[in-house]
Amino acid sequence: DLDRAWWKESVVYQIYPRSFNDTNSDGVGDIPGIIEKVDYLDDLGVDIIWLNPVYESPNADNGYDIADYQSIMDEFGTMDDWELLLEELHDRDIRLIMDLVVNHTSDEHEWFIKSRANEDEYRDYYFWRNGRTDIDGFTGFNGPENEAPPNEWESFFGGPAWAYDDDVGKWYMHLFDRKQPDLNWENPAVREEIFEMMEWWLDKGIDGFRMDVINLISKPDSVVHHDPPTNESEMWHSIDGPRIHEFLGEMHDRVLKDNDVFALGEMMGQHMDMGLARSYVGRDGPLSTIFHFDHVLLDNGGPIWETKDWGLHDLRGVFTRWQDGLSADGWNSIYLSNHDQPRLVSRFGNDDRYRRESATLLATLIFTLRGTPYIFQGAEIGMTNYPFESLSEFRDVETINPVKNALGNDEIDSFEQVKHALRHNSRDNARTPMQWSDAENAGFTDGKPWIGVNTNYEEINVEAARADPNSIWNYYRDLISLRDEHEVMVYGHYGLLLGEHDSVWGYTRSLDGAHLLVLLNFSDHEQHFDIPDWELPFDEQSIDAELFVCNYDHDVGNEIPDRWFELRPWEARVYHLA
Ligand code: TEU
Ligand code: CA
């Protein structure tokens, strides 16, 4: 019993509309620009589009600060444009999931405006709390003199997680930017509004939601009940908070259960317990699958200007824990990049000498682990990080705010000091425009792009990639169609091989007597190794092996050479055995 679902068999393509394709020359991508590219998406072979927020927003956090959940941002087009996009996608059997951002709204949302105006009904839509006056000389928080925020929580974007409002005379909580006040899910009226809004979108015909930071919606008791001030570490109790199962369960019963939807939850935190993970996405859980952060926190985690070393052991360890943890119950999401992360080939591969090889190796990983695979726009042509030279080139609050704060309080001396870390970590690496061709601005816009186009667009672009049979693009396309044809790629059981190897990640996937043998060389050097036969779930003498996928010229033959292998730098090889 495979516990089949269409969203398990699908490949997701993520579109960041602002940077995808601009049709009216204002330098900002738009929905008509996506419509222009639906044939491109269809050609690539993807099954689901995840669209980053396109709702009305003042764009303090590029659409993650929503002012109206039921209308389209002017810059991106109209509701008619959006409806046409849905129709064009559905005509090609491509499904659409929308971003659901309901941990917070914009401070320009009607609910917040009414809440701030002290309208009774809306007062408790957000968390309004009194400041602290019990600490001497505690100023500088943009509140009244000698008043500190209700507690020491820090926003994920730097600075206190509370902002003072003069009219109300109280502080409101914002785990992200001050223009993103957190909604109070304790209030049943808030939940009702959200569920109705979700139903409204489902009635329009969408196929599911990607739920932004959805495991933050239940806040710790200290804030809910406004106990005396609490310490900073308590803010982490917002992650998987006390009523999270109750809230998601209610959403499931009320909205998700009766619709055949893909419910994808983004879940902050690190090292989630596997029992907890199964409670979210297992057979009886409210969600289909989640995004966890374990692998993307390997190389950072502190301030944005710090990086940490990681090795293959760490990366393989993370994925193996999740593969094993959800093998019998639940379903994984396999992503190596998105709009919040640097480019995958720059981060996990070698974007210089082995750009093609390492980008295709990473694609092999994404499509051969067990779970739903995600492509963030541009990954399919091996787009790289951007060589930022000054702070003025950045657009992202999560980069700019903390760096400005740190410069202000002398935590860092200069931009130069943090330049290399920002080039590595900043979310803006992912947000530079899609490179369509070698025309000016990479064919993204005829105007002035809202953020710089990577200077390598003359070499790295869709047009060039499609024309080259050995390109990263064609490799993605082949893997997507192979996954359609071979069930073992979707449902096969994951078994780790060579668990101690420093550079090679090996595993098998097995389903009903069919096996894949996946070998990935995560290094700039040749690797020679053999696989002990007791590690293999099959007898290689009595089984027919076929070289199924390889990111080098196929001159290695079909045989599995007595379990003795030589892999070239960043070589990826997949054998199919039956
Ligand atoms: O992301 C949550 C989140 O944790 C990131 O902002 C995180 O800080 C980053 O990945 C680490 O570099 C979601 C959205 O994906 C993001 O774009 C929004 O800014 C954020 O929520 C607030 O809505
Ligand atoms: Ca535009």
Image (cartoon, helix red, strand yellow):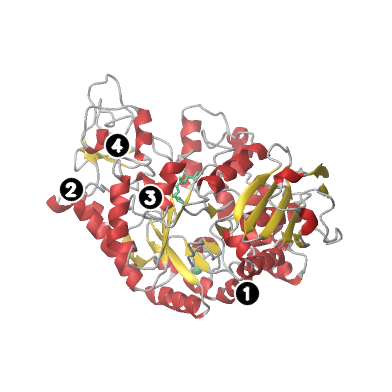
Q: Earlier in the sequence, mark 2 or mark 1?
A: 1
Distance from the alpha carbon under mark 1 to that under mark 4: 47 Å
Whether label 1 touches label 3, CB < 8 Å: no
- The image shows residue 96, relative to residue 145, as above or below, that is below
On the picture, is 192 further left or further right than 67?
A: left
Give the structural element (helix, strand or loop) at label 4.
loop
Whether label 2 touches label 3, CB < 8 Å: no
Q: Residue 477, image x and y in percent? A: 66, 68
Q: Tag on residue 123? A: 2
Whether label 2 touches label 1, CB < 8 Å: no
Q: Tag on residue 43? A: 1
Which amino acid does the dot numbered 2 rest on? Answer: Arg
Q: Residue 64, image x and y in percent? A: 40, 54
Q: Any atom of ligand 1 within 8 Å of the CB at mark 4?
A: no
Distance from the alpha carbon under mark 2 to that under mark 1: 50 Å
Q: Which residue is mark 4?
A: 220
Distance from the alpha carbon under mark 1 to that under mark 3: 33 Å
On the picture, is 334 further left or further right than 266?
A: right
Q: Residue 463, image x and y in percent? A: 70, 70
Few, some or many C-alpha atoms within 10 Å of disc 4 (few <14, some 14-19, many ≥20)?
many
Residue appearing at x 70%, y 36% in the figure: 500
Front of the two marks 4 and 2: 4
Residue appearing at x 64%, y 38% in the figure: 420
Say which of 545 and 318 sits in front. 545
Distance from the alpha carbon under mark 4 to that under mark 2: 19 Å
Q: Which residue is mark 3?
A: 214
Q: Quadrant of the C terminus?
A: bottom right
Distance from the alpha carbon under mark 3 to that under mark 4: 15 Å
Q: Residue 187, image x and y in percent? A: 20, 49
